[in-house]
Amino acid sequence: SEAVALWASVQLVATAVFLWVKGVRASRSAKLMPGSNVAYYLVSAAAMGAIVYFLSGFLLDRSLDALIYGAKLLAVIGAGTLVYFGVTFALDSKFRAMARSVLK
């Protein structure tokens, strides 16, 4: 569970740094305004992070056999994925329209 939290923290910091660098570079040639749906993605990411954090603490035990641990890890990842896209689908009308067009 600590490894998952550490990995998530490193990914968050790396993503923030890359976005900041890209933003600085892009702002040199154009004015950047975040879209109105950025908050939806932040809410979705927070919900996914909470689910993954709590499920990994509940389901993942390092003393488990590797195969059982892997299956439970996939279940945690799947639950996080469903929560992220479910919340995004519920909040963002543009995402809903895109998902519907892809799933047709």
Image (spheres, rainbow, N blue to C red):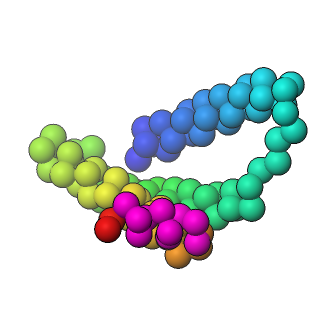
Q: Is residue 33 left or right of residue 93?
A: right
Read off the magenta span: 93-102
In the image, what residue occupies the spot 41% across and 69% down?
100
In the image, what residue occupies the spot 51% across and 41% down?
8
Q: Depth check: 93 or 15 in front? A: 93
Instruction: Indicate the position of residue 46 as horizontal and vertical percent values.
Output: 59, 59
Instruction: Indicate the position of residue 35 as horizontal and vertical percent values.
Output: 74, 55
Tell which residue pokes out farthest to the bottom in this image. 90
- Residue 74 shows in this picture: yes
Q: Is residue 55 left or right of residue 36?
A: left
Q: Depth check: 77 or 104 in front? A: 104
Image quadrant assignment for residue 4: top left
Q: Is residue 14 left or right of residue 86?
A: right
Q: Is residue 24 left or right of residue 99?
A: right
Q: Depth check: 77 or 59 in front? A: 77
Instruction: Indicate the position of residue 14 as horizontal and vertical percent values.
Output: 61, 30
Instruction: Indicate the position of residue 39 as horizontal and vertical percent values.
Output: 70, 61
Q: Quadrant of the C terminus?
A: bottom left
Query: Magenta-highlighted stretch: main secondary structure?
Result: helix
As for residue 97 lying within the magenta part, the answer is yes
Residue 84 vs 9, above or below: the answer is below
Count of labels in the image? 0
In the image, what residue occupies the spot 87% across and 38% down?
31
Residue 20 vs 53, above or below: the answer is above
- Residue 83 shows in this picture: no
In the image, what residue occupies the spot 68% across and 62% down?
37
Residue 72 vs 9, above or below: the answer is below
Residue 70 vs 27, above or below: the answer is below
